[in-house]
Amino acid sequence: MAYKDILLHLETYPDPTPDLALDQGLALCAALGEQVTALAPQVSIPLKTNRLADFALKLGDMAKAEEARSRQNAENLLDRFETGAKTLGVFGGRLSPAAEVFQTPELTARLARTRDLCVIPYGREAAAYQGVAEAMIFSSGRPVVIFRPNETRPAQGGLGTVVVAWDGSRSAAAAVAAALPALVSARKVVVLTVLNEKASAGAGAAQDLIRYLGRHGIVAESQEFDSAGAKIGSVLDHVALRSEADLLVMGAFGHSRAREFVLGGATRSMLESPPVPVLLAH
């Protein structure tokens, strides 16, 4: 069981997705599924100014130069992706639609609605990628995997350990359902319950989930961790890194208000600094 159709999002502006992030993102996609399509939007920069200001500052020329840089970045990224994906046998296509600079999150979310999964490799500045990740989680209806590139991370050769953060919530259930292909293929599955953090996450809360996973042929083990007053994000960081997890699965909590996302603490922590690749679903 594997994801049949994965979308890999690549940034082209203001800075392109780094080569290491692209390569590790492609390797992660290959570990998760069968066909990967890369999306590298070409941004356009609309100008609302008067002729005098444009003449004095040459804003039009500056915008055209930035748009050309985005197009070149897109071409370079897609060429590198295609070469690597064909080598791995997972090439599913390349997309490079035009979009206004602030519309790329909505574009990615729209295109992801007809994919199994969207993978977003972070670059050096996580903030540049968070908008796309948030739009994906709350607007696409599909799961998203985010991660930071890591020079010490070994080459992906399938999924080893997957940690499922389980608190019995609706969003956690959605994440488990979305992650089933990954859980089936993982060599080890750990269901993590953080105690003394939510009333729904008490001792033994994971047992019925372990029963459910067993019906899908997944042998999972339970792990309980007392938060002892620590923030949930730091607990998830600690356990994921200590377990040497290849993937952390968790529900995303939040909602959109006036085009800004109001996020739960654990969701915000993961979006800002994912310790390992994180699959989020809402």
Image (spheres, helix red, strand yellow):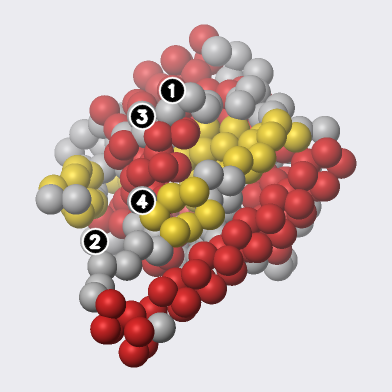
Q: Is 38 left or right of 220, judged from the image as shown?
A: right
* Circle 1: residue type: Ala
Q: Residues within 10 Å of mark 1 (few under 14, many from 20)?
A: some
Task: Name the residue located 61 percent from the left edge and 26 percent from the top edge.
Answer: 5
Distance from disc 1 to disc 4, alpha carbons, whole Å, reads 29 Å
Image quadrant holding the N terminus, namely top right
- Mark linked to residue 229: 2
The kind of residue tagged 2 is Gly
Q: Which disc, if any, is residue 141?
A: 3
User: Distance from label 4 to label 3 (Cα)?
Assistant: 18 Å
Q: Find residue 177 and name its label.
A: 1
Which residue is at 19% across, 45% downward? 256
Which mark identifies residue 211? none
Instruction: Decide which of 246, 43 is in the foreground and name it.
Output: 43
Q: Which SS class for mark 3?
A: loop
Q: Which residue is mark 4?
A: 103
Of marks 1 and 4, which one's residue comes earlier in the chain? 4
Q: Is 190 in front, or is 76?
A: 76
